[in-house]
Amino acid sequence: MSTVLIIEDNEKNMKLARDILRAKGYDTLEAVNGEDGVRLALAHKPDLVLMDIQLPDINGIQAFQRIRANPDTARTPVVAFTASVTQSDRSRINDAGFTGFLSKPINLKEFLETVRRVLEGPRE
């Protein structure tokens, strides 16, 4: 089964995402800040990363760039997982090159469809 790394500093959002993913049979890894998220991504090479943008140390875009800069994880799909939904935030996220976007609070159907589509879709 696929492994999903969740990088999220809000305990309730982390628990909800983890519980949903595990109930569907996915393995999960968890980080509560960007530095730990990058470290886990490089060490474990997950099949998907769900990346919060507002993190307590480096932001999600910086963490994303570090993951993409490493040849071992350069092709790992990274989906922005954030409550930052203003047009300028979405533009910044799209411009950075994230694989997709999930807004919080979690919409269960959209969350699961996005995870499934990214994990089962072709990687470029």
Image (cartoon, rainbow, N blue to C red):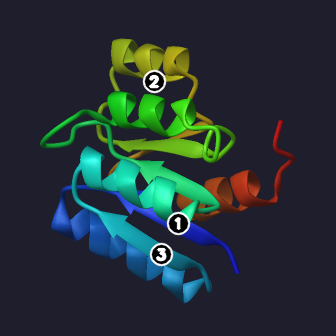
Residue carrying label 1 = 44
Q: Is residue 106 visible?
A: no
Taking 78 as reference, is 2 left or right? right
Vertical placement of residue 83 versus 40, above or below: above
Residue carrying label 2 = 93
Q: Earlier in the sequence, mark 3 or mark 1?
A: 3
Q: Residue at x 54, y 58 (%)?
A: 111
Taking 107 as reference, is 13 left or right? left
Marking on residue 14: none
Between the residue at mark 3 and the residue at mark 1, the CA separation in whole angstroms equals 11 Å
> Horizontal and vertical percent for residue 116?
71, 62
**Where is the N terminus found, in terms of image quarters?**
bottom right
Marking on residue 28: 3
User: Outermost residue toward the left?
Assistant: 56
Q: Please rate how many residues cluster around mark 3, counting C-alpha atoms within 10 Å: few if below 14, some from 14 to 19, many from 20.
A: some
Q: Is residue 123 visible?
A: yes
The answer to which of 55 and 67 lies nearer the viewer is 67
Q: Please rate how many residues cluster around mark 2, counting C-alpha atoms within 10 Å: few if below 14, some from 14 to 19, many from 20.
A: many
